[in-house]
Amino acid sequence: MPIDHAIQCIHDPVLAILSYVVSVLGSFTALQLAIAIPTAVGAGQRWRAITAAGIAMGGGAIWAMHFIAMLACRMNVEVTYDLPITIGSAVVAVVSCMAGLAIAGTGIFNWGKLIIAGVLMGLGVTGMHYAGMAAMLMPADTVYNSNLVIASAAIAIVASIVALWLAFNLRGWGQMLGSALVMGVAVCGMHYTGMLAASFVPHEAGAAAVARGVSGGYLGIGIFVVTTALLAAVLTLSLVRQRQRATVRI
């Protein structure tokens, strides 16, 4: 079928909103957890802090937002998702965020390390997004607008640099909440720019592959509920520990 007959996503507004909410919560949790990185005593404690913040950022703020928003995509062809590729995209998001946090949070904080870490993290986030797109199983070919692909990568890199700067320079609930709201906009902006870059050209050859993937009418809401519950539990535990440490110092 010619490219003139390509179709694009129409997004379910409820899932689109939920994708933003989970991104904000993941960002806020990651900012809270990142506080422990510069003050960690010993390599073990430092890597635990990096891992926790990386999972919150990569798994919650970025990947969960991405996959819920992918499930929000509505087209007149059936779409399912290849499970191994989808899991792999989540791993890419978490590892790239951990790498960015490790580089930016090592030693004295400076702009050189921040930019290197942000570029690495942004490219990882971009790779996560397009790996997630490659996980789509459907009777259609995906065609990309290269200018919008580049724009989505640029947004991811800038958002990553901003996120890392915020992680190591902000304190206080008000500042972190405001920053998390902005980071949610940036992460969603990257995702939806990437989705705008994609057009889908229907064909019949891929119909058999659809049955191999995962899908479900309530899968997006289910991921939102589980991710939100996990992030809330981690955030609560982090805040309790911070309060306990403050009490001990007093």
Image (spheres, helix red, strand yellow):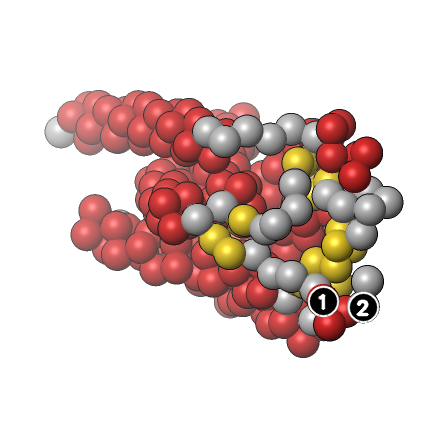
Q: Is residue 216 above or below residue 136?
A: above
Q: Residue furthest left?
A: 250
Q: Secondary structure at mark 1?
A: helix
- Which quarter of the picture shows residue 246? top left
Q: Which mark is residue 5?
A: 1
Identified at 44% across, 61% down, the residue is 186
Residue 147 position, x and y percent, is 67, 76
The amino acid type found where label 1 is placed reads: His
Q: Is residue 110 above or below residue 76?
A: below
Residue 12 position, x and y percent, is 44, 48
Q: Which mark is residue 2?
A: 2
- In the picture, measured across the screen, residue 34 lies left or right of residue 155, that is left
- In the picture, measured across the screen, residue 125 lies left or right of residue 53, that is right
The amino acid type found where label 2 is placed reads: Pro
Tell me, yes or no, whether the two marked residues, 2 and 1, touch with CB atoms within 8 Å.
yes
Local crowd size for mark 1, using a 10 Å CA cut-off: few (<14), some (14–19), many (≥20): few
Q: Secondary structure at mark 2?
A: loop
